[in-house]
Image (spheres, rainbow, N blue to C red):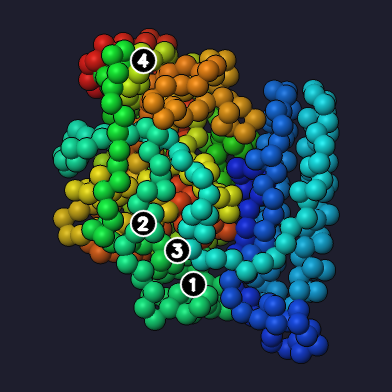
């Protein structure tokens, strides 16, 4: 059943972001002086602090209201992006300040005050949030590696080394938890021939990129790297005496029933178009922005073993000039996500054990997000998706798309947090109730090991192609570092207990 949903404009994941356009403010405004020169050329951004990332603990009774307000903050950034793009040629910094930034600050101040009031109804009123209302306009880098000096050692799960669903042989080297995901970044050859100083594209008047088939808003040529030039970078943690070496797999298909929507029920419940990009779904057939635990528990599933969990991730598109049916829809063309949606050639969903202990059952309705849809603007501290090619999966990339050779397929891998606080199925920032394992594979004090979800998604892409793009928030420019995955556990208690038994006893169960 097709589930493309037409939805209102409201961004999710925390109220911050950078909206990027190409500015050329010289036209018809000779009285702007140095302000005009500052806006003369290049890729410019509306840069707003990420309020959601800085919130204190939000009382349970206030979370729905706060999530709605955070979505409004993101919608404001999107609106500012559109106004800045439409205002090209109308002036320099003074015009931007008066017509874009000041109204944005006023609206953000009101929204932030409502967030503080909502929190105050169940806890102490947070202080200092009002300082996050102002935004700025500044020139943006067109590469996603500007945070390369940031300490961002993310934990990365094992790479499944069996056979995927279409029979492709995986490589005989595991991708380990606790891998430093900066390894392999920026390796290979710069694809900067004939590129200009604004990031490698002739920037069109609409802020788009006039480079071949690449579309408005990215990605750019330097977001791609030949996988053959990347050095092997996968490490592994050795299993200890009390390790749990089994696995449990759910075969849930490749979204053959075309379950798409641009919602995100975890971070923006009750909000239409809460992601501003289209999601692929497998598993639970009912998932959208308005799902509840009860509706998920009552729904059918595409998983053959009765697993009602919902698994979703941004779609991958090919930007070859073709159009998808969402070309004029929210989450699609209205949010700068263009091109034909690629159906995966294979989807592998596996739950694995811990290298140092047994695992305990996940609670039903546990929510986990891996990666950060705003890593391009937030920095890479929460980035955790990786890209590779079949035949080269001992080489993993975080901030580059792989250019795969003939006979090789593009692979996306999502490694989910494997430690749980033992109490909460979610948290205010949707992260702190779960954690990645430590360097030795153990969970920190206060956390217990749970089955580790690893999703591996394979695509048939033309060899040597540089015209793929992951759906993203428009200000994220389709950077590969923004890739992310979402999961809600809706397994029955019996099925979860079966999974735990398989993992702890060392068996491989399908």
The residue tagged with tag 1: helix, strand or loop? loop
Q: Nearer the viewer, residue 26 or 265?
A: 26
Find residue 327 and name its label. Answer: none
Marked residue nearer the N-terminal end (3 or 2): 3
Q: Nearer the viewer, residue 397 or 510?
A: 397
Residue under circle 4? 357
- For the residues labelled 2 and 1, the Cα–Cα distance comes to 16 Å
The residue tagged with tag 3: helix, strand or loop? loop
- Rendered residue at 42%/14% (across/down): 361
Residue under circle 3? 219
Estimate how packed mark 3 is, as few (under 14), some (14 to 19) or many (20 or more) residues with alpha carbons within 10 Å: many
| Image-based side of 327 in relation to 156, left or right | right
Between disc 1 and disc 4, the foreground one is: 4
Marked residue nearer the N-terminal end (2 or 4): 4
406, above or below 447, in the image: below
Res 4 seen here? no
So how many labels did they put on this image? 4
Marked residue nearer the N-terminal end (1 or 3): 1
- For the residues labelled 1 and 3, the Cα–Cα distance comes to 10 Å
- Rendered residue at 18%/37% (across/down): 172
The residue tagged with tag 4: helix, strand or loop? loop
Residue under circle 2? 401
- For the residues labelled 3 and 2, the Cα–Cα distance comes to 10 Å
Residue 457 in the image: state x and y as whole percent. Answer: 31, 42
- For the residues labelled 2 and 4, the Cα–Cα distance comes to 35 Å
Between disc 2 and disc 4, the foreground one is: 4
Q: Kindly indicate whether the residue at mark 2 contacts the one at mark 3 (C-beta within 8 angstroms).
A: yes
The quarter of the image holding the N terminus is top left
């Amino acid at each position: 059943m097709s589930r493309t949903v037409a939805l209102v404009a409201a961004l999710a994941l925390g109220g911050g972001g950078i909206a990027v356009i190409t500015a050329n403010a010289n036209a018809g405004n000779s009285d702007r002086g140095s302000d005009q020169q500052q806006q003369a050329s290049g890729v410019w951004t509306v840069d707003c602090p990420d309020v959601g990332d800085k919130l204190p603990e939000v009382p349970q009774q206030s979370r729905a209201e706060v999530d709605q307000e955070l979505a409004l903050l993101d919608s404001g950034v999107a609106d500012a992006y559109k106004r800045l793009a439409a205002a090209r040629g109308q002036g320099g910094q003074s015009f931007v300040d008066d017509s874009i930034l000041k109204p944005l600050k006023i609206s953000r101040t009101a929204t932030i005050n409502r967030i503080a009031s909502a929190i105050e109804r169940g806890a102490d009123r947070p202080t200092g949030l009002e300082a996050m209302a102002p935004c700025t306009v500044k020139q943006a880098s067109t590469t996603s590696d500007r945070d390369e000096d940031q300490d961002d050692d993310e934990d990365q799960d094992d790479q499944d080394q069996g056979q995927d669903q279409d029979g492709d042989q995986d490589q005989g080297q595991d991708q380990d938890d606790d891998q430093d995901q900066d390894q392999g970044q920026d390796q290979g050859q710069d694809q900067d021939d004939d590129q200009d100083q604004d990031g490698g594209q002739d920037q069109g008047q609409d802020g788009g990129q006039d480079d071949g088939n690449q579309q408005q808003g990215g990605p750019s040529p330097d977001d791609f790297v030949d996988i053959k030039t990347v050095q092997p970078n996968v490490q592994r943690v050795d299993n200890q005496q009390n390790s749990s070496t089994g696995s449990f797999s759910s075969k849930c298909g490749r979204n053959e029933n075309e379950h798409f929507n641009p919602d995100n029920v975890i971070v923006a419940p009750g909000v239409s178009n809460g992601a501003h990009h289209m999601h692929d779904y497998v598993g639970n057939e009912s998932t959208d922005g308005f799902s509840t635990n009860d509706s998920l528990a009552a729904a059918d599933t595409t998983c053959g073993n009765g697993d009602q969990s919902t698994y979703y991730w941004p779609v991958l598109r090919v930007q070859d000039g073709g159009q998808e049916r969402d070309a004029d829809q929210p989450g699609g063309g209205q949010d700068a996500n263009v091109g034909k949606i690629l159906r995966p050639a294979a989807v592998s969903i596996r739950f694995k054990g811990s290298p140092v202990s047994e695992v305990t059952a996940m609670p039903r309705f546990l929510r986990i997000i891996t990666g950060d849809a705003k890593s391009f603007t937030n920095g890479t501290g929460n980035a955790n998706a990786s890209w590779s090619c079949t035949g080269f999966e001992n080489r993993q990339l975080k901030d580059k798309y792989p250019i795969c050779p003939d006979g090789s397929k593009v692979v996306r891998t999502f490694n989910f947090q494997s430690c749980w606080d033992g109490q909460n199925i979610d948290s205010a920032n949707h992260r702190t109730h779960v954690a990645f394992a430590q360097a030795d594979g153990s969970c920190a004090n206060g956390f217990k090991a749970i089955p580790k979800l690893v999703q591996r998604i394979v695509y048939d892409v033309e060899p040597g192609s540089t015209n793929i793009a992951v759906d993203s928030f428009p200000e994220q420019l389709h950077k590969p570092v923004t890739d992310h995955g979402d999961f809600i556990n809706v397994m029955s208690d019996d099925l979860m207990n079966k999974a735990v038994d398989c993992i702890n006893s060392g068996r491989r169960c399908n």
